[in-house]
Image (cartoon, rainbow, N blue to C red):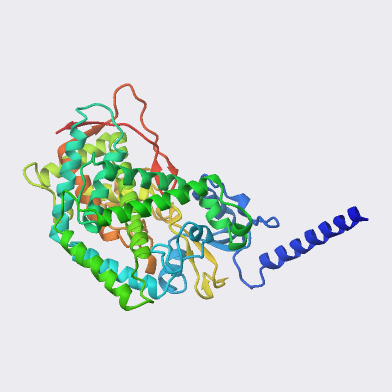
Amino acid sequence: CTLENLTLLALFCTVFLLIFDFIKRRKVWKSYPPGPWELPFVGSMFHVNLRSPHLSISKLRQTFGDVYSLQYAWRNVVVLNGYEVIKEALVKNAEAFADRPHLPLYEKLGYTENNKGIALAHYGRSWKEQRRFTLFTLRNFGLGKKSLEERIIEEAGFLTAAFQSQKGQPFNPHFKLNNAISNVICSLTFGARFDYDDQQFLNLLYVLEENRHLEGGLWGETLWFSSLSLSVFSLSGPARNYSRTVLKLSDRILTFYRLKPKIRSPNYNKRKKWLVGIERSTKEDSDSSFNEGNLIFTTLDMFLAGTETTTTTLRWALLYMVLYPDIQAKVHEEIDRVIGKDRDPTLKDQLEMPFTNAVIHEVQRSGDILPLGVLHMTCKDAEVMGYFIPKRTLIMTNLSSVLKDEKLWEKPHQFYPQNFLDADSKFVKHQAFLPFSLGRRVCLGEQLARMELFLFFTFLMQHLTFRVPQGIHKPKEDGELAFTLAPYPYKICVETR
């Protein structure tokens, strides 16, 4: 009798869960985007390879079109493909698509409603305050001014010297590039730069790199976990490790804010006043979004958005230079003709350097470092290309579908700077060039990234020649997806020009 009761109970629970799952996953809306078939509880998650989701997402487009849906457990996901579709969503319906999803996994790791920084914050007062204040602060600290341009050139000089110190021997440029780009962010946020062998600085960069790899491996868990599942299941090993790195990063960032650096930048005193202002604002307004938690996570956003992405783009740039020596030679020729060797590059030089400018843009297009952008969420019902998209739907913007669109680019799957040159070899900016996305959530660090990419790349190319080491196979031209789509580790040799 007991066994029969247990069997009936198990059967009842199974039927109940199946009905509950069906109710949660059923689509009652007309004109909801089509998508692949689903399984109970899992949804259509198994159609996506979590090691290379960007490839799976692009492959599904061939079957279901530019607007299609996925189901991750009980979460509705809509994937947007193509320039016109993404523009309609993020520009024409900007507010509806400006939210970020509720991700319980990140809240488990320390992100709360009032402490989400900028990147993960919901669209509303806190996000607007943090973004407006951060932009104001960056401009106050030199963004868009000659002082920051000079700071970047100074750091490019340190980076060039670090490359030259290898004396022609093979080395991986990754961490030296990371040191240099991070120092620009450090000068803005901490009011200081650090020697490349400074142990505290190296510890921060090590944890940032560890964070990048772990976060990339959590792509599936980020979507799948709900508040309920997190209360039932414990975090996986990688998620627990990621949690530890977030705590380490928080601790490191607070340490750097309290540090009295050996090498102070002109921003050091401004930074002190900025921190005092945050503390005063918190005391005067209990609802203010200016607090220590947001300070940490906004700084973390700046490091991830302002360091990792630019470092990865420059890694692609050097890789393409060693793989395409003829293109490298043309860049050298243009630099010698326009700038020469007796002065440093300036941002004004871009206007006279169409080929170098085209190469930098092609690096961003071909490298495609954020193929799926950053997750959005609808904050109200919306419509795109005639499809109904309900409130609180997760939105993936397949930026690869724009940057590699065969209808928009002459050679979309090759490294081809002529994609940005007209018949007269003049630079042409393409409307489908969207490495920073579109709309209200467009990358906060776009202006800084453009400055850094041009000045660092041009300075390095002015002084150095890059080549593949003898006896070593040419590096792979594809990459691996973690937080960003980055080249596989490679080694190069440099020679002073």
The quadrant of the picture occupied by the C terminus is top left
- The residue lying at 15 percent from left, 43 percent from top is 157
On the question of residue 101 being in view, the answer is yes
- The residue lying at 22 percent from left, 30 percent from top is 166
Q: Quadrant of residue 429?
A: bottom left
Q: Is residue 34 above or below residue 259?
A: below
Q: Residue furthest top?
A: 471
The quadrant of the picture occupied by the N terminus is bottom right
**Residue 424 drawn at (x, y percent):** 22, 52
**Residue 208 drawn at (x, y percent):** 36, 47
On the question of residue 352 being in view, the answer is no
Say which of 295 and 218 sits in front. Answer: 295
- The residue lying at 74 percent from left, 62 percent from top is 17
Q: Quadrant of residue 408?
A: bottom left
Q: Is residue 121 above or below residue 246?
A: below
* Left or right for 305, reference 345: right
Q: Residue furthest right?
A: 1
Q: Total number of numbered labels?
A: 0
Say which of 380 and 186 sits in front. Answer: 186
* Left or right for 213, reference 157: right
**Residue 392 drawn at (x, y percent):** 54, 70
**Residue 211 drawn at (x, y percent):** 41, 48
Q: Is residue 289 above or below residue 53?
A: below
